[in-house]
Image (spheres, grey):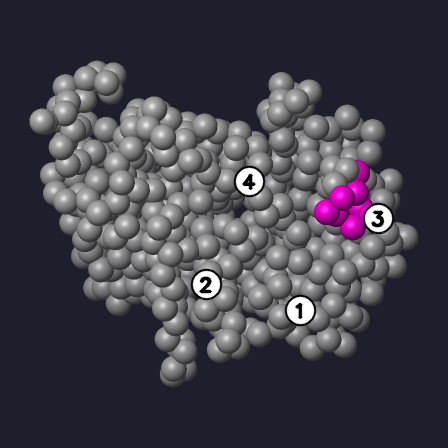
């Protein structure tokens, strides 16, 4: 019997898909629905009207055509790290089952093919045996595709640039359900070249990517980890860091964070339940050079704990020590043109000791190096002029739930005089409006034109995002 969409508010169209689907189809109330739509960020509870759990690119194509027939916005979700709304009333395509990673290590330009549901840990596990590394992020639990399409700033970023700069090809399902293979050598001015430019940095609204082909780099080890100081020493450490960090060679990536850690037996005893300054450091250079570069910051204040040392690239999570398990989080971030003494004081005053801040992390990351350079094949990645990046997170639960947004806004307002650009992967608090604001007018208008050309009904939301 043909089912109808009468259980979906405002819909009267048949629910029969326009083609065969190998993956399950779920609606609100189905036994597996909540588990299927849940993401890493537990602050949001996705509520799509319909879910297609894709097992192939063909499933994604059918799902997109189905959403268009039903008049539903179609969204994709892999790990759910990038959630910043509840996806209500959409058709959600979950790609977590597409986990394949294939490495081509031969020749002077090794690559990996990475399916839409693969996490960075899957990619690293496949590439490490060859002494190769992807441009992965600070946490290997993050989905590789969404991270890359949003720009992608990881521990190798100052040396090699944004992850999006090194996409060689991709498989994309556009709003009409067409499967397209886009490559870096598409002739300028063609629809393929426009899409390839837009999706790398525009991230959403142009199609659903089911596979990326990315460059790999000859990195097998790092000299990295963290140095921890008491929060009372934040002024000394941050003022030292702001003059030290910009002098570093591009093979070094570093950030510094004000970190409120919970009492957790899984944390090292010196850190459990403590408010600390966390200096993050990663270098691909020689050990003696890395140790010499780090010495001035180690001398900036008494050290609580120091984990910096030789690491295989597969242990890259040890640098940032991001939480590996899902948790509720509300974040906000943007680029900074400079980190002046006044900017440091503003950060410490709103997020440091005695500030009353409910934010569990407030981080400043050094950018520049290859991140400031244009890639060989142009893309839409914004924020190349930013010298630093700011990122803060609060956990909106318990007593802090009502105050986290205001504390994020307070920290952001304090740093507004130095605000300069940003990345779509780091915009939560301002939602779609915050994403739009990242792009210069000419870039945003081009993104809107490309979205409208390939998706006149705005099935994938590109026109709504950039128009």
Give the magenta part as a residue range.
265-273
Label pair 3/4, CB-CB below 8 angstroms: no
Is residue 454 visible in this depiction of the protein?
A: no
Label 2 neighbourhood size at 10 Å, few (<14), some (14-19), many (20+)? Answer: many
Q: Residue at x 51, y 69 (%)?
A: 133
Distance from disc 3 to disc 4, alpha carbons, whole Å, reads 24 Å
**Earlier residue among tags 2 and 1:** 2
Q: Residue 254 placed where, x, y %?
A: 67, 57
For label 1, the residue is 311
Quadrant including the C terminus: top left
Residue 211 in picture, x, y percent from top left: 32, 57
What residue appears at the point 62 percent right and 63 percent down from the top-left corner? 315
Cα distance in 3D space between marks 2 and 1: 17 Å
| CA distance for labels 3 and 2 | 33 Å
Which residue corresponds to mark 2? 123
In the picture, residue 362 is in which quadrant?
top right
The residue under label 3 is 270
Report the residue marked by disc 4.
Answer: 326
Q: In the shown orientation, is residue 440 left or right of residue 445?
A: right
């Amino acid at each position: 019997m043909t089912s109808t969409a009468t259980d979906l508010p405002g819909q009267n169209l048949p629910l029969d898909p326009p083609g065969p689907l190998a993956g399950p189809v779920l609606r609100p109330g189905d036994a597996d629905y909540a588990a299927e739509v849940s993401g890493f960020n537990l602050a949001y509870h996705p509520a799509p009207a319909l879910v297609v759990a894709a097992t192939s690119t063909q499933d994604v194509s059918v799902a997109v055509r189905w959403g268009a027939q039903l008049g539903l916005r179609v969204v994709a979700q892999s790990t759910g790290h990038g959630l910043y709304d509840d996806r209500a009333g959409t058709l959600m395509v979950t790609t977590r089952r597409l986990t394949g990673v294939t490495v081509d290590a031969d020749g002077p330009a090794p690559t990996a093919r990475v399916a839409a549901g693969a996490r960075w840990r899957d990619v690293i596990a496949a590439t490490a045996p060859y002494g190769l590394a992807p441009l992965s992020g600070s946490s290997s639990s993050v989905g590789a595709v969404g991270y890359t399409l949003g720009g992608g700033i990881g521990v190798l970023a100052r040396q090699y640039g944004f992850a999006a700069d090194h996409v060689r090809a991709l498989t994309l399902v556009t709003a009409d359900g067409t499967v397209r293979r886009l490559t870096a050598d598409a002739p300028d001015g063609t629809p393929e070249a426009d899409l390839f430019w837009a999706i790398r940095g525009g991230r959403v609204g142009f199609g659903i990517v089911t596979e990326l082909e990315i460059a790999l780099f000859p990195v097998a080890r790092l000299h990295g980890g963290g140095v921890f100081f008491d929060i009372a020493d934040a002024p000394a450490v941050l003022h030292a860091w702001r003059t030290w960090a910009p002098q570093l060679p591009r093979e070094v990536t570093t950030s510094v964070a004000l970190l409120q850690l919970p009492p957790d037996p899984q944390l090292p005893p010196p850190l459990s339940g403590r408010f600390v300054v966390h200096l993050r450091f990663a270098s691909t250079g020689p050990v003696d050079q890395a140790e010499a570069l780090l010495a001035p910051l180690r001398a900036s204040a008494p050290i609580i704990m120091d984990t910096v040392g030789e690491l295989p690239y597969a242990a890259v999570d040890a640098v940032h020590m991001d939480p590996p398990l899902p948790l509720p989080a509300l974040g906000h971030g943007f680029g900074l043109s400079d980190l002046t003494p006044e900017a440091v004081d503003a950060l410490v005053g709103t997020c440091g000791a005695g500030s009353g801040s409910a934010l569990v992390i407030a981080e400043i990351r050094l950018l520049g190096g290859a991140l400031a350079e244009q890639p060989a094949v142009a893309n839409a990645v914004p924020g190349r002029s930013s010298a630093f990046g700011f990122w803060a997170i609060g956990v909106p639960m318990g007593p802090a739930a009502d105050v986290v947004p205001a504390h994020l806004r307070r920290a952001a307002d304090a740093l507004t005089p130095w605000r300069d650009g940003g990345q779509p992967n780091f915009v939560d608090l301002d939602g779609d409006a915050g994403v739009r604001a990242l792009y210069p007018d000419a870039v945003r208008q081009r993104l809107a034109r490309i979205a409208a050309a390939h998706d006149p009904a705005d099935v994938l939301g590109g026109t709504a995002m950039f128009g």
